[in-house]
Image: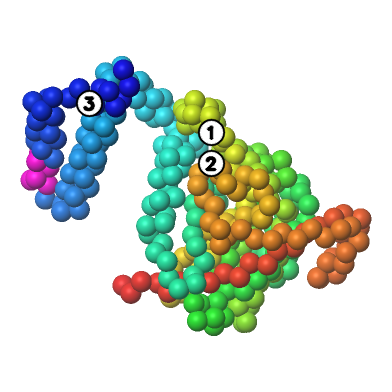
Amino acid sequence: MTVNQRRGTVSAEQAERESQLVERAVASFEGTSDPRLKELMQALTRHLHAFLREVRLTEEEWQRAIEFLTAVGHITDDRRQEFILLSDVLGASMQTITINNEAQANATEATVFGPFFVEGSPEIEPGGDIAAGAAGEPCWVEGTVTDTDGQPVPHALIEVWEADQDGFYDVQYDDRVAARGHLFSDAGGRYRFWAVAPTPYPIPHDGPAGRLLAATGRSPMRASHLHFMVKADGFRTLVTHIFVRGDELLGRDSVFGVRDSLVMDFTPQPPGTPPPDGRDLGDRAWSRVSFDVVLARAAAP
Ligand SMILES: [Fe+2]
């Protein structure tokens, strides 16, 4: 019997029993003293019951859901956060970010933070190299940091981090600090640095979230990207990535992080093309990208 057939068989008496139960469960939170907690719990209860009733959840399916969530808990520890992965692949992380980074004029869009940021990254000089030995094709990154009126934002803190050409972050090796760093915009709001060309990589998919992706025919791959976090006094902190135009994964990023406005031209430079800073790259190919950051004003306190 299909879901629609099952739904069609619900009698008026049955529907009444079900809706009375929803009302009782929602009303049970009526005495919550914290008004926000009350709102969250009552809405969660209403939506959860609506889901159960819509799909006519079987008891066997309920049992499997409990087992799945139990497995998500069991694999989670200080280093592995499967609940965040699950939230990511359901689009819940990205939706929360979207809700909390309301559009403001032409301010750069935010996207997922991801699990690989590390506090205390090395500071690099303007034009310096964040690679620190990470394997990958050199990539020159430059741009400006401005406000939404186009005025430069000097001395903005710019944190950048990325995977190497094999798709791994330094923290996944345990023996290095590489392909991450921080720098500051100059008096004119400009910044520039060397990185490595971003590459695609899979989110950890050897646990329940990965099994969910496999069961539903979805890929764990993330589109190639370079992470940015930009902070300046008086502005909303921007957490974002830039993506590579032409990457075949742009339309099926496993965590829904791609925004059209964040897709950039990474322009290939054939071997022998002189880099902007005169760096000697021998016979290596390199690429360059320009990314102008526009910061939104911080909300009034
Ligand atoms: Fe990433």
Kind of residue at badge 1: Arg
Q: What span is colored magenta in the figure?
A: 27-32
Residue at (52, 66) in percent of width and height: 108
Residue 25 belongs to magenta span: no
Residue 131 drawn above or below residue 186:
above
Callout 1: CB less than 8 Å from ligand 1: no
Residue at (37, 57) in percent of width and height: 99
Q: Quadrant of residue 157?
A: bottom right
Quadrant into which the N terminus falls: top left
Q: Which mark is residue 254?
A: 2
Apparent side of residue 39 relative to residue 94 in the rendered image (left or right): left
Q: Quadrant of residue 145?
A: bottom right
Residue at (89, 57) in percent of width and height: 271
Q: Which one is closest to the eye, mark 3 or mark 2?
A: 3
Residue 30 belongs to magenta span: yes
N-term-proximal mark, 2 vs 1: 1
Judged from the image, the secondary structure of the residue bearing numbered disc 3 is helix
Apparent side of residue 150 relative to residue 34 in the rendered image (left or right): right
How much space separates mark 3 and mark 1, taking CA atoms? 31 Å
Kind of residue at badge 2: Ser
Judged from the image, the secondary structure of the residue bearing numbered disc 1 is loop
Residue at label 1?
A: 218
Main SS of the magenta segment? loop
Dots 2, 1 in contact, CB < 8 A: yes
How much space separates mark 3 and mark 2, taking CA atoms? 35 Å
Closer-to-camera residue (132/98): 98
Number of marks: 3
Apparent side of residue 222 relative to residue 148 in the rendered image (left or right): right
Quadrant into which the C terminus falls: bottom left
Kind of residue at badge 3: Gly
